[in-house]
Structure formats: C-alpha cells, structure tokens
Image (cartoon, rainbow, N blue to C red):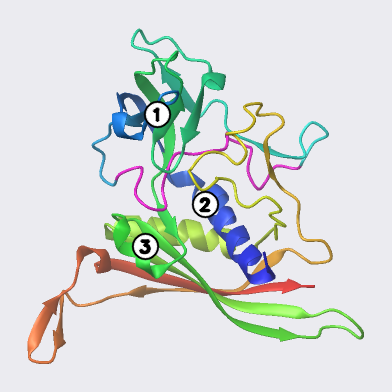
Amino acid sequence: MYRLRREDDSVYLYIKDVVLKPFIEKQEKEALLYIKELSTDTTAVYEIETFLQPSPFDRGRGMVYFDEGFDYCLVNTPTYSGTPEQSNRIRVYDENLNIIDDTSYMIDYMDGRIITTYNTKPAYIDYFWNYVSLVDEWSAVTAADPPVVVLDVSGTDKKGYQLGGGKQVDRKMTLHIFASSTAERNDLIEVIYDNLYLKGCPLYELPEGTVLDYDGTFYGRRHNMNKDETLFSRATVSGTSNLMFENVSHRNINLPLAMSRGMDKVMLSDLNAYRAKITCDLRSYA
C-alpha cells in the first residue's frame, strides 16, 4: 500500500469515526429475518428488517464498529496494541428477548447481517448506525440517499523542506456535501469545518488493511472471535508527521431546479438541491 492510498484511508477513518460521530443514530428491537439464499449447511445468515429512510445499509453507512471512546482519540494502553471491535453498540436477542452472547455470531456491519450457526436463533437486534453516508468515489453518490459526503483527495505537490533528506507533501482535498435540507446541510458544514480547521489526523500504516474485511466483518473475526486479540492496528507510518488540514474553506453550491441542455430543459435530481463544498490542503512531512 503506497502513501497516497494510506493518506486517503486515514482521512476517511478520521472523518467517519471522529468528525461524523454526532450523526450516529440508534435503533432498537428491529427484527432479524433468516435468509436461506445466503446460508449454508453450517452457517445461518439473518438480515435486519428495516424500513428507515435513508437506509442504514446504503453505500457508505453501516453499523458502528467501535464502542464510544474507542476511536482516533484513544491513546493505546499496555492492554491493547490497537482498537477492539465494539462490545456494547450491538445487542442481539432471541425470540424471548434474552441477550445472545456476542461470541456466538459475527456481524456484517456494511449489509446489516448476523452470521451464526444453527444452534443460535437470533430474532431481534439493537444497533447504532452512521446516518451520514461517507464515500470516496463519485460513482457511489447515487447509491445512497442524502446526506452523502464525498471525499476526494487529488492533486499532489512535493518539495524539500530541509537540507538533506525530507520533503513536504501537499495534496488537494475536497469534501462534497449532499444534504436533504438546508438545515441538515448547515449542520454538516459546521461540524466538518470545525473538525478540520487548525486540526490534523494520524497517518496510519494500515498493515492489515482497514477496519472491516471485504465481507463487512471486523478484520480477522472469521479466524478469531477473541476481541482482545483481533484488533484494528493504530500503528502510524514511521518517519512522517500527522496529516494536517491547511487553508480550510467552504462555500455553498446553489443550482437551479432546471438546467438548459441545448433546446431542452433538464430537471436536476433531489441530490443536487442542498449542496456544499469544503476544500483544504492536506499537508504532511516525511
């Protein structure tokens, strides 16, 4: 994994786990439905039945995978060399509302599914989820209802900053905000701006990838159910500084309801009704 990818993933984790924390929502006692098509002879898959709009399982959302306090702000202790999977943000119940031990199942945080054996019969679930969809590619914008935030890191400038080795790395970073109302857009602007202005975030080494595996489960969970041993690594890239947000600025994007294209008028989608953009320079020293 090269530096640009590490920077992009590190900023993504900072925005999702820290900046957008005020927009986390909670659902209680939602039903779990057995999905025969996804189950096997030994594994049963249950999916959360939800009618919320926006859906908690749109692209860029999903259930929260860290407990309160176990995020970027946490300083590693001798007990942990990284950050453990949540232990109280999700509760799974049987049909009699008895809590099922969390060592009896795995969680697909992205798609809202519980993976277990046929010895366990989950029926209901409490969970926290990310109300704001955060994506890092434009093609994913239309895959989720607003609010959506698009992270775009591009444009690189590198130059020396001392005699001998060492360089200053500057990249252009833009956050495109798509909201469902003026009030929601303004709230997002205020929270994001305040968490970028005169602030920075760690540049993670990410030796084992990001928090979730390709199937939406916590990294390594399929091989080890011990949450004190299977951790998200907080190791940072050696010989480099934190990523600093410089020259932070914001502007609203006001588009007409219809735009002319040749002789025709084209109606814009609701996704473009309440937009804003926050830009900054992403700076680090290596």
Which amino acid is tagged 1?
Thr
What is the distance, in whole Å, between disc 1 and disc 2 at their CAs? 33 Å
Crowding around mark 1 (Cα neighbors within 10 Å: few <14, some 14 to 19, many 20+) is few
Is residue 286 at all visible to an observer of this figure? yes
Which is more N-terminal, label 1 or label 3? 1
- For label 3, the residue is 140
- For label 2, the residue is 16
* Residue at the (46%, 59%) spot, across then down: 190
The N terminus: image quadrant: bottom right
Which is more N-terminal, label 2 or label 3? 2
The C terminus: image quadrant: bottom right
Which amino acid is tagged 3?
Ala
What is the distance, in whole Å, between disc 3 and disc 1 at their CAs? 30 Å
3 or 1: mark nearer the eye: 1
Is residue 198 at all visible to an observer of this figure? no
| 19 or 14: nearer the viewer | 14
Badge 1 vs badge 2, beta-carbon distance below 8 Å: no
Label 1's element?
A: loop
Could you tell me residue 57's position as x and y percent? 36, 44
Which is more N-terminal, label 2 or label 1? 2
Q: Is residue 249 left or right of residue 130?
A: right
